[in-house]
Amino acid sequence: IKDLFARPTIKALSVALDAGQLEVHEPVPILAPFALLSAEEQAVLADQYAVDQLEDAYPLSKLQQGIILLAEKQRSLNVYLNFHLYQFDERWDEKYFKEALIYLINKHAVLRSFYDMSGERPLQLILRKKPELDLQIFDSRFIIDDEKDKTLMDWQQSELKKGLDLRHGVWKASVHRYAENRFVFAMFTHHASWDGWSTESFIAELYLIFNLLIRGKKLPVDASLPSFNQVIALEQMAV
């Protein structure tokens, strides 16, 4: 990180790398599922879940633990709970929008994750397959304009009152149809798993995949993504 701040351009980093001025680390090897858990933790999960139910599990990062601790200490303030609203100026198609979401859920493990805080240390568990797509859809097309946003605000207030139970997932979503060619996709997320960059990246992908589907285009074949367990492994090596 200090090298990036000291040399904030690709050119400066390249010059420093050629001159041997940067400390280069070997990449973290790909880890087997559950490799970061103790034998006791693996045994507990084996008792609680079917063999094919979980794809992986690993400890939460120190940052995630801190965020959750602060959120719990200030529960009444709803800190670290965020709403994200995105307008799509496209024809609504429930089938293809859900298909786009499922495509991304299968691609990104965080969208299938939940937290287990009951053990010796908090864990992040990754489902092999999300049981169902919980997407609320509100049709506000025939409501007068001044009232259209009220449905959206009511959903926000309702979800905020219930909060996010991290034992069941780290996000919720809804769709609010405003017109034939306009709808709002709303997300309710916990900052322990979502930040501004990752949310915007997810929405950009969602918009792309949805547009490919409604236009009958082929979806991209993505290379396998690195696992967040590699980040946890690096953190454990550093502390």
Image: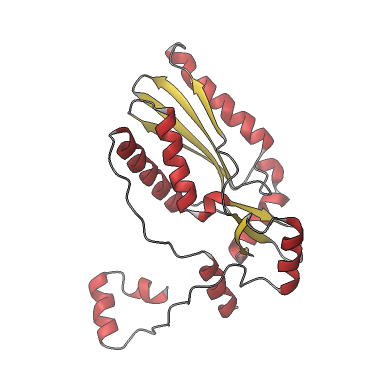
The number of numbered badges drawn on the structure is 0
* Up/down of 49 relative to 24, above or below: above
**Extreme bottom residue here?**
20
* Up/down of 122 relative to 215, above or below: below
Residue 39, image quadrant: bottom right
Image coordinates for residue 23, horizontal then vertical, percent: 39, 85
- Toward the viewer: 73 or 17? 17
Q: Quadrant of the C terminus?
A: bottom right
* Up/down of 158 relative to 113, above or below: above
Residue 141, image quadrant: top left
- Toward the viewer: 53 or 147? 53
Image coordinates for residue 191, horizontal then vertical, percent: 56, 51
Residue 30 shown left or right of residue 216 in the figure:
right
Residue at 40% in and 43% down:
203
Image coordinates for residue 110, horizontal then vertical, percent: 53, 53
Image coordinates for residue 121, horizontal then vertical, percent: 72, 65
- What's the colour scheme? secondary structure
Q: Quadrant of the N terminus?
A: bottom left
Residue 236 shown left or right of residue 178 in the figure:
right
Residue 47, image quadrant: bottom right
Residue at 71% in and 50% down:
72
**Extreme front residue here?**
51
Residue at 30% in and 39% down:
212
- Toward the viewer: 218 or 19? 218
